[in-house]
């Protein structure tokens, strides 16, 4: 009987882990909260009508801290260009932005970036925006891997990129993400520091294995 209870507990815990892949996100309705996120930074309401006071160009140039509840201490800065807080988001013709964080969790093995970027240049045949990583004060320009995107005709275009920190060969204690944007409007961003987690296929195999263990235990109890 105790073995049966133990198996049910293990299976329940595994199902809870799987369900962690999908739950409500506080930065933007299209964003997901990555499983095993150690910390995150979120910026939303990037417009002149922001709740609690308008976002200003001066704030962008000086560096704006993440404003979503539960965020860490990363800073979003307009380094150059003409993007400014418009009615719905940051609007402009060409700008360079950086996301900087000097407190990377020691257990982080990946970064996950999500953004709502209406990339008008990319949609109409121009140069699309680019997003690159440098770390530990270096001048690297490592492109992220695009893992998901949803194009909604310029209304709200969703992009998700990842960087495998474990492949860099050195512990990452600080990073800078550089966003080069042309003609575009940007509504929200989120960056997660993520620990290694099994892929969904691995969870499926794990659950299948647990099912076989449960069946074997049940047979033992029945003396089959």
Image (spheres, rainbow, N blue to C red):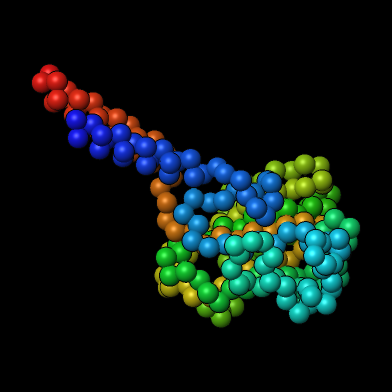
Q: Is residue 216 above or below residue 6?
A: above
Taking 78 as reference, is 5 left or right?
left
Taking 86 as reference, is 197 left or right?
left
Q: Farthest residue toward the left?
A: 223
The residue at the point 17 percent across, 23 percent down is: 219
Q: Is residue 144 visible?
A: no
The spot of residue 126 in percent (x, y) is 81, 55
Q: Between residues 121 and 56, which one lies in front from this camera angle?
A: 56
Taking 20 as reference, is 61 left or right?
right
Q: Looking at the image, how many numbered discs can be counted on the residues?
A: 0
Q: Is residue 190 visible?
A: yes
The quarter of the image holding the C terminus is: top left
The residue at the point 45 percent across, 62 percent down is: 109
The spot of residue 3 in percent (x, y) is 20, 34
User: Would you identify the image quadrant in which residue 142 lies?
Assistant: bottom right
Q: Between residues 62 and 125, which one lies in front from this camera angle?
A: 62
The spot of residue 141 in percent (x, y) is 60, 70
User: Would you identify the image quadrant in which residue 133 lies?
Assistant: bottom right
Q: Is residue 84 above or below residue 223?
A: below
The spot of residue 113 in percent (x, y) is 61, 58
The quarter of the image holding the N terminus is: top left
Q: Is residue 123 above or below residue 166?
A: above
The residue at the point 79 percent across, 52 percent down is: 118
The residue at the point 84 percent across, 67 percent down is: 54
């Amino acid at each position: 009987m105790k073995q049966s209870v133990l198996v049910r507990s293990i299976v329940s815990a595994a199902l809870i882990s799987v369900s962690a892949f999908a739950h409500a996100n506080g930065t933007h309705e299209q964003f997901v909260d990555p499983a095993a996120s150690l910390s995150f930074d979120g910026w939303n309401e990037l417009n002149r009508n922001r709740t609690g006071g308008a976002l200003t160009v001066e704030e962008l140039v000086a560096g704006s801290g993440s404003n979503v509840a539960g965020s860490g201490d990363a800073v979003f800065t307009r380094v150059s260009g003409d993007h400014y807080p418009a009615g719905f988001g940051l609007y402009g013709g060409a700008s360079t932005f950086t996301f900087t964080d000097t407190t990377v969790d020691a257990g982080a093995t990946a970064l996950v970036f999500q953004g709502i970027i209406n990339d008008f240049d990319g949609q109409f045949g121009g140069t699309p925006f680019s997003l690159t990583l440098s770390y530990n004060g270096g001048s690297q320009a490592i492109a992220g891997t695009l893992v998901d995107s949803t194009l909604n005709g310029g209304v709200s275009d969703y992009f998700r990129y990842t960087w495998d920190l474990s492949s860099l060969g050195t512990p990452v204690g600080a990073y800078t993400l550089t966003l080069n944007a042309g003609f575009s409007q940007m509504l929200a961003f989120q960056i997660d520091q993520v620990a290694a987690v099994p892929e969904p296929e691995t969870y499926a195999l794990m659950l299948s294995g647990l099912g076989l263990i449960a069946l074997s235990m049940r047979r033992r109890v029945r003396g089959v």
